[in-house]
Image (cartoon, rainbow, N blue to C red):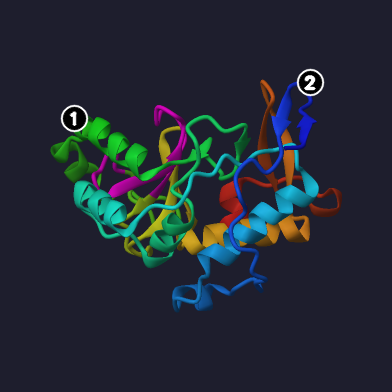
Amino acid sequence: MPTNKSPSGKKRSVAKRPLAERTAATPRTKSELSAGAFDAAACWARIERWFVEHHPELDLELRPGAKEKEIDAAETRLGVTFPADFRASLRVHDGQDDEPRLFLLPFSERLGSLKSMVACSKSDRPSYDARDTEGRFEWLDDSRRVRQVHFHPKHVAFAGRKYWDHGRLMFDFVPGPEGRAGQIIALADVDFVFVCSSFGELLERTASGLEQGAITLEAAGYDYVRLRYGSRRGEEPVTAAAFFG
């Protein structure tokens, strides 16, 4: 298999895992996504194809898809029902390996697997304080979409670091009065911020941003690479929350 050298001089395999089916797709609007038009396989194919064409030295380290019974079991363990677009994505890729070189999503280092998501929830449960949550339940972000409640069992992390410390991306099943159940939020330092309305939107806009040049890559130290947002035509980058929100 062909290899390329990373900036550190290490050899890395190119396209180590097979691409998802290469189906052409047109970027979807928010209304189309909410209507169930999200095509997870096509969206992943666009992302994978972009990296093969522009950065073949980077392996996305995506895992094979999960089986329906595995998704059902994880939902039972977590006590939630996953949004349909996330279930569709899981059938294509059950997250990334634990320590990928490429940080594909904002606020996090890897897209978690079902197994890691369940492990994160189990680890968080002892830290959940129902009395403290009751007192903080009406603490909201400026948009009034996100409650500032920590370790809530209805905040389901799906992307983060290997040990789920520091930044995370989460499904929010206890949204604020202006939010919607299943929206995507992030833990940024000690605050929760709104990212976008759905997982499908997060993935679709990542694919479109790469294709249109609105998302580029930048070094993250120690031979790691992350996405840089809103940097088309020499523009200054913006925060991920501003780019998606």
* For residue 92, side relative to residue 210 (left or right): left
* For residue 184, side relative to residue 221 (left or right): left
* Residue type at numbered disc 1: Pro
Is label 1 or label 2 in front? 2
Q: In the rendered image of this protein, does residue 132 appear above or below residue 68?
A: above
Badge 2 density bin: few <14, some 14–19, many ≥20, Cα 10 Å? few
* Residue type at numbered disc 2: Gly
- Residue 46 drawn at (x, y percent): 66, 60
- Mark 1–mark 2 distance (CA, rounded to whole Å): 44 Å
Q: Which residues are magenta?
A: 149-170
In the picture, residue 88 is in which quadrant? Answer: bottom left
Q: In the rendered image of this protein, does residue 197 appear above or below residue 233?
A: below
Q: Residue sitting at 79 percent across and 48 percent down?
A: 54
- Residue 167 drawn at (x, y percent): 47, 35
* Residue at mark 1: 126
On residue 9, which mark appears?
2
In the picture, residue 208 is in which quadrant? Answer: bottom right
Badge 1 density bin: few <14, some 14–19, many ≥20, Cα 10 Å? few
Q: Is residue 155 magenta?
A: yes
Counting residues from the start of the chain, the first of labels 1 and 2 encountered is: 2
Q: Residue sitting at 45 percent across and 74 percent down?
A: 34
Front in this rendered view, residue 45 or 123: 45
Residue 215 seen from this side: no
- Residue 134 drawn at (x, y percent): 17, 45
Work out which residue is located at the far right of the displayed protein and give it. Answer: 233
Residue 191 seen from this side: yes
- Residue 236 drawn at (x, y percent): 78, 45
